[in-house]
Structures are given as structure tokens and as C-alpha cells.
Amino acid sequence: MGVESIAAAERLLVALDFDGTVAPLVDDPSTSRVTPAAAEAIARLGALPATWVAFVSGRPLASLAQLTGAGPDALLIGSHGVEVSLRGRLADAELSDDERARMARLEAALIELVTAVPGARLEHKPVGYGVHTRLVERTELVAPLQQAAREAADAIGGFTTRVGKDIVEFSVRAVNKGDGVRMLRELLADEAGGPVAVLYAGDDVTDEDAFAVLGEGDLGVKVGEGPTAATARVADVEAFATLLSELATVREASARSL
């Protein structure tokens, strides 16, 4: 299925990863922004009938909301599906005492490991941690650091581990981006009174969970290189912005013909 086919869907959810998909990867995650071309296309799509745009990211929900300029009607999935904001309604991600205790033990271990590797950074997430290595100049230290972090998590037990671009993440909740996409589709189908087609786009290994829940009539778009279950691929963020613009143009034309 291509852009023209998915654009003709009666109801369409455009679900987007953030970093590396609509915003370039940068050294300081707080400076990341959606490219102007992608932002324009997203605004056009969001203005169309029976068309919804959602962001599905590994970022914590607060960061995702800030960087996307989320309004009151935003559909946001943060922390790989753990944190959910559906038009301002937050899903409860409250930790149990056991989960908090395991996180505290892992935090102590990870702080020691990250401190020993110049350029490494520990990110605190609502239900876990991310060990970032993008700024580690001595690349020979990356693999040992990631392995030691995984061993620390395994020794404590009860963590889901995800390896992405320059990051290894640990979560005490076993959900993923595929769960987030499935939740969004079901919500919108209930609201709209009929099935909803999904275009999902992402650039990282963690996006494969979302591609895996797509079916006939959906479209998965891999941004960049690497093996994937997605049925379409574009080279980079700029190329994906072009695809989004084409999608908006075709869907606008379809809307005018109704």
C-alpha cells in the first residue's frame, strides 16, 4: 500500500515517532524540534475530517507534550506506551512499592556505571531509565557500558530492556509502542463508529513493535536504514516530511470531492 491508497481511507490515524522521524536527532534532546515542513503537513492533516495525528515516542510524556506543542485535543503516547494522554485525559502510571524499590536499586547501579564513562548520560523516566551514549567519544566504551547496564537490570529482575539508537532503556512496565498504537486505534474506532486505518512511521528498533501491529489497509514507513517490518521506507527526516505533505495533498483532494 502506498500514500494514495492510505490517503483514501475513510478514517485515518497518522501515528508518528518523534526523534529521527519528524525531528532530526540532535546531541541535546531538549533542543529537538519538528521540521517546518513536517509541522506544516501535520497541521494540514489534523485539520481534515476523520483524520487524526498522534505522537508515539520513547520520550517521557511531559517532554513529548512540550516539544510537539500539544493542545487540549492531542493524542500522545510517551515512554514507549507506558504514559498515555488522550485529549488531556492521563492514564494512570502509578508505581507499586515493589516497582519503586527495584527502580531505586537500578538507579544506584546505573549512576555508578554512567559516571565512569565520559559523555554517557542517565535519563530518568516515569517507569525506568535510559542510558544514553550519543556523546561518548571513546566508542570502545559503549558496548561494555550497555552490557554492564543490562546485567545490572537482569540481576535485579523485572525490567523490560530496549536497545535503540545510542540508548539502552529499562522499564518496570512491559508495554511497547505497538500497545500504544493499538490503544489509539481502538479509541478512535469507538468514537468514530467504524474501523480506522493507520499510517505509522518511525526510525528506531523500538518502532518495530508498532509496525508489528499493523494489518491490511495500514501503512508502515521506516525512516532511514536498518531491517524492518515496515512496507515502505524513506531515506531521512526530510524525505518523510515530503511524504507527509504528499499524504496531506491527496487526502485534502479526497475531502473536497466528498
Image (spheres, rainbow, N blue to C red):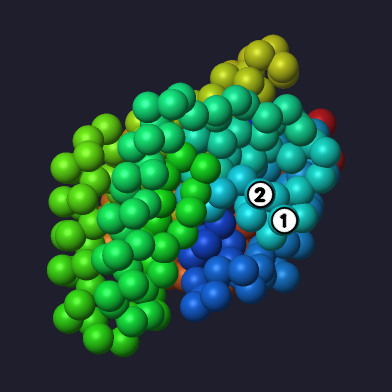
Instruction: Kindly identify the residue that appears in the image at 63 percent across and 52 percent down.
Output: 64
Binning the other alpha carbons within 10 Å of mark 1 as few (below 14), some (14 to 19) or many (20 upward) gives few
Q: Is residue 166 visible?
A: no
Placement of 192 over or under 155, stated as above or below: above
The x, y position of residue 14, in whole percent, is 61, 42
Side (left or right) of 250 relative to 112? right
Binning the other alpha carbons within 10 Å of mark 2 as few (below 14), some (14 to 19) or many (20 upward) gives some
- Label 2 with label 1: CB-CB less than 8 Å: yes
The x, y position of residue 242, in whole percent, is 60, 66
Placement of 179 over or under 114, stated as above or below: above
Side (left or right) of 5 relative to 47? left
The x, y position of residue 171, in whole percent, is 37, 41
Instruction: Kindly identify the residue that appears in the image at 76 percent across and 62 percent down.
Output: 40
Q: Which residue is mark 1?
A: 66
Q: Which residue is mark 2?
A: 62
Placement of 47 over or under 147, stated as above or below: above
Instruction: Determine the image quadrant of residue 41.
Output: bottom right
Secondary structure of the residue carrying tag 2 is helix
Instruction: Kindly identify the residue that appears in the image at 22 percent across and 39 percent down.
Output: 156
Amino acid type shown at disc 2? Ala
Quarter the N terminus occupies: top left
